[in-house]
Structures are given as structure tokens and as C-alpha cells.
Image: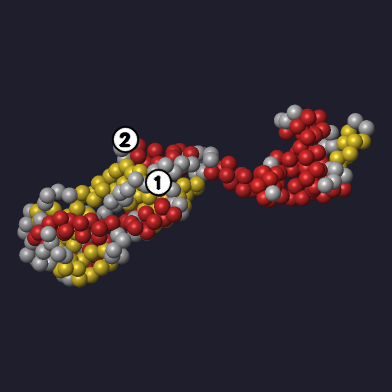
Amino acid sequence: MGHNRSVRESDLAPKLAVLKALAADEHVTRVAERVGLPQPTVSRWIAELGEQLGAPLLVRSGRRVRLTRAGRLLAEAATRSLAALEPGLREVEEELDPEKGRVVLGFLHMLGRAIVPELVRSYRAEHPHVRFGLVQNARQAVVDKLVSGEIDLALVAPPPAGPEFESVVVFEQPLIVVVPAGHRLESRKAVRIEDLADEDLITLEHGYGLRQITDDMCAAAGVVPRYVFECQEIETVRGLVAAGLGVALLTHAEFAPPPGLRELSLTPRTGRIFGLTWLSGNPLTPAVRAFRDHALRTHGVQR
């Protein structure tokens, strides 16, 4: 019984749309032409609705039809229901329009200064009506939001591994060692991870991509890191290093580093890889797909 009812309910919306049209023009043939259905189908649908309700919805009146009281009441309810549905349908249509859809991009805090704004600006120059939701957070938080469906695309480093993800490398930043002025390593042309074994290290908290990279590199070199400060912002790490409180593994500063800071090359050369990631097998809306392809073209990456 429940199964039959669900089938009837699934067919209700198009029948109610026909009934709404009949309320405006009580002429079956004209309504059938307007909604693009054969006239017998329109008549059958309205008859089926009446049978389900236990009362006829139409009566003949010469060459025309007239809605009964039950038919009029149902048509009014259909008009209200369809009116409430129309804004949602328009939103869905816009979502599926590559020129009007919405893109939700998650990314690391450091990318909000220049890289993401330029990426969005260049895209909107060609697609001015596309809307954006921009979500900044630590790497793991961004990846979690991607998995939960809160964002469409993630720009993080390193890109997450696993069959549920699809990623493309968009750019790479070389990793360096930063030390305070006057540090024993200051004169070195290049520094190895092993050289940091006895140093106080300053790093980001767990959940940040750079922390994961630091942990992994220390483990690979057999170094047990001695973390003395764990931060949430890279610029805070730079400031603490400049104050002489430790050393850190970072990328080159986008802007002028604080005075008292020295940047040293890391050997062997190692890069921090940034990847644009989306869920594998998850269909992307046209707007999201178009923005993804633009981001990959902008950074000269071939899929």
C-alpha cells in the first residue's frame, strides 16, 4: 500500500501543473497544446487525480470543461505549492548554468593573499555572473569539508591521497630552512634535515600541511623533532624565528621577511606541492568544472 502511494506521489507534480493550467483556461485541448502533452493524456491525468481523491475534478460544460469545487481547491493548492517550488527550480537551473552557477573553493590561509584572489579575478573577468564561496582553513579542515560536500574544490598542500580523491598539481614552492641572524648555520650554502636534529623547531599545529611535511621529512631522515612552539600562522612562525626562539622549515616569504631572519637552501632540494583536488566519481556542476579547468590552464597544468 505504501509503495503504491509513493508511486502516485511521484507522479503528482506534473498532474498538478496541468490542473493549474486548466484553472486558468478551462479548455482541455488548448491546455494540452500549452503543456506539450496529447489531449487524451491530459484528460486521463485529471481523471486519475479525481479517482485518487474520490471526487471528480472536472465536469463538461458544452465544449469546455469546468472545475468542480474540489478541482478548484486542489488547483489553488497546486498554484501555491508550485509557486513555492519555482525559486528552488530557478536556483537549480542557475547551478547548472556554467555562467551563473556557484563555486565553493576551500584553500589554505596563505593562499588568500594573492594566489586565490588573482585566480578568482581572472575567471570572473570572463564569467562575471558566477558566484563564489571561499573557505579558508587548515589543510585537514579543508579536506574534511571536501569529503562532507561543503566545498566543491580544495587547493591544499600536499594534495590528499586515496582513491576517493582526484588531484592535479598546480604549482610547487621550494622548502627552505629559516634561522635567526647569527645562528650557527647562517653561513651554510645549504642545510640538510639532519642538521636540525639538535635544534629547537618552530612549526604549525597538527592538521596543517606544512606540519605534516615537516613530520614526514624528519621521520625519513631519522630525526626526532624537538618542537618548542606550535602555531596557526606561518607569519607567526617567521616572527618567532626572527626573535631567536628556534628554527623552522618554511617556504620563501611572499613579502619582505622580518628583520633578523635568514633563509637557507634545503638539500636535497624539496618542494611543497599544491594540488587542486575534487572527489573522484563525484559529478561536478558545469560552473565548478569550468572553474577547475580554468585554474589548471592558468597554472599551465595538463590533466
Q: Residue at x 25, y 60 (%)?
A: 211
Q: Secondary structure at mark 2?
A: loop
At label 2, the amino acid type is Gln
CB contact under 8 Å: marks 1 and 2: no
Which residue reaches farthest front?
A: 1
Q: Residue at x 90, y 36 (%)?
A: 60
Residue 276 is situated, as x and y percent measured from the top left of the image, at 35, 46
In this picture the colour scheme is secondary structure
The answer to whether residue 123 shows anywhere in this view is: no
Q: Secondary structure at mark 1?
A: strand
Identify the mark nearer the N-term, 1 or 2: 1
Q: CA distance from mark 1 to mark 2?
A: 18 Å
Residue 142 is situated, as x and y percent measured from the top left of the image, at 38, 56
- Viewed as shown, does residue 262 lie left or right of 75? left
Q: Which residue is mark 1?
A: 279
Q: Residue at x 75, y 47 (%)?
A: 78
Residue 197 found in image quarter: bottom left
Residue 284 is situated, as x and y percent measured from the top left of the image, at 46, 42
Q: Nearer the viewer, residue 150 or 265?
A: 150
Q: Nearer the viewer, residue 177 or 230?
A: 230
